[in-house]
Image (cartoon, rainbow, N blue to C red):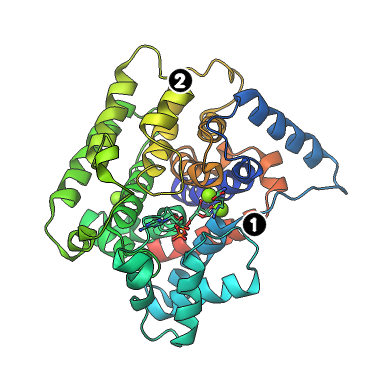
Amino acid sequence: MSTTLSKFQGTLVGAVVGDCIGAIFESLWAKTINPNKVIGAIENLETVSKEEDNHRIYEFTDDTAMARSVAKSLVINEGFDASDMAERFSENYFDEPDRGYGGNVINVFSQLKELDYKDVFGPAKKQFGGSGSYGNGGAMRIAPAALFTFKDDDPEKSKDLVTQITSITHSNNQAILGAVLQSYAVDMALNSSSTFSPDEMVDALITLMKMVEEEPNETNKSSEGPQKEDKSEQKLKTYVEKLELIKTYLKQEEQPTQLTVHTELGADISAFESVPAAVYSFLRSQKDFADLKDRNSFEKTIVYAISLGGDSDTVATMAGAIAGACYGVESIPISWQKCCEGVEDAKKFAEGLYKLSQMS
Ligand code: F2R
Ligand code: MG
Ligand code: MG
Ligand code: MG
């Protein structure tokens, strides 16, 4: 298998296993989760996968459901078709409403359907009194877009596609910028070797996000409404500031505790307080992890992301996409792949996106 195909499959399979395994803990909504508990769940999964006739399938949630729609729509249309993607989001929700969708995004699906997918960006703009959702539902599904724009090597083009895909459901600037950061992180991981420098990668992300956050464009105007609750309560105000904090973590001899990271970077349902945690979970995979001596860097990323607690399926799906993009599909244990629903489809979508990337 070519390295690029392995990385494309790693991205989408990594996202699926992060979602499926993270979802086991999402309902706890705990502040942090003992890594031994996460490892226990994974060992259980590995045991189950050996019993050929008795696979307990770990089901995917809304994160994967929506990522599948993004991937399918891009592949079938060989590009972005807003109406088609909106219809896929919405119809998938009505087919399987129990995948654990966000509390308010489901109103967007209803309105999109009522409007027959004609005013594709209208319903999202009306959410939360016009400020739009700042949830992480845009970032959690964006990995296929990073694969689609990979061949262009053009951050501006990639940002535009991510903005459009996210804006179907999330018009708040924090949600859009979070999706842009997640997509840049996947792109960088696709371009990196497994022995990349976390310091250099965080610097490169800071450079890119500085440009995006300073841009006076339509997207930034939409942030005039309320952001994540009262901004005065948030110590850090921009994604660049969060990345600067990650940079200081990485420079420390001992990495901060999960509780510190949960408190300072966040691990909740908003994009601003979950995408940086996913990026850090990946970057941290190059560092020691006392509880995980015998696991590879992909496995470390997933266990660490889940151990941050909070929105564990979503932090793990985003971290899993970045880690899979870097380390390739071979880094994802077969036993995990066997137990998680949607892995085979993820491989096919990745193949479709890979074929598109090879076309001139
Ligand atoms: N929905 C879940 N998990 C349910 C568990 C929640 C928790 N245990 C609880 O008890 O409440 N997971 C899935 O949802 C997340 C993605 O959500 P998405 O797609 O962004 O949805 P939505 O509805 O747009 O936003 C989510 C919530 O965020 C708050 N919110 C967003 N924007 C707001 C704003 N401008 N003002 C005020 N609140 C805002 C609302 O509470 C929304 O319901 C992923 O975790 C996925 O796994
Ligand atoms: Mg979910
Ligand atoms: Mg590139
Ligand atoms: Mg979630």
The residue carrying pointer 2 sits among few (fewer than 14), some (14 to 19) or many (20 or more) residues within 10 Å by Cα, namely: few
- Residue in the image at 48% along x and 37% along y: 327
Q: Is residue 222 above or below residue 210?
A: below
In the drawing, does residue 21 fall left or right of residue 177? right
Ligand 2 under 8 Å from disc 1 Cβ: no
Residue at the spot x=30%, y=68% of the render? 130
Q: Are marks 1 and 2 in contact (CB under 8 Å)?
A: no
**Secondary structure at numbered mark 2:** loop
Nearer to me, 338 or 305: 305
Where's residue 112, x and y in %?
Answer: 45, 80
Up/down of 6 relative to 161, above or below: above
- The dot on residue 344 is 1
Q: Residue at x 58, y 48 (%)?
A: 19
Residue 47 lies, in percent from the top left, at 79, 34
Q: Residue furthest right?
A: 53
Residue 193 % position (x, y): 39, 34
Residue 280's quadrant in the figure? top left
Q: Earlier in the sequence, mark 1 or mark 2?
A: 2
Residue 197 shows in this picture: no
Given the image, on which type of amino acid does mark 1 rest? Glu
**Dot 1 surroundings within 10 Å: few (below 14), some, or many (20 or more)?**
some
Disc 2 marks which amino acid? Thr
Residue 257, above or below 243: above
Q: CA distance from mark 1 to mark 2?
A: 35 Å
The residue mark sitting in front, 1 or 2, is 2
Q: Secondary structure at mark 1?
A: helix
Indicate the quadrant containing the C terminus: top left, top right, bottom left or bottom right. bottom left
| Residue position for label 2 | 257
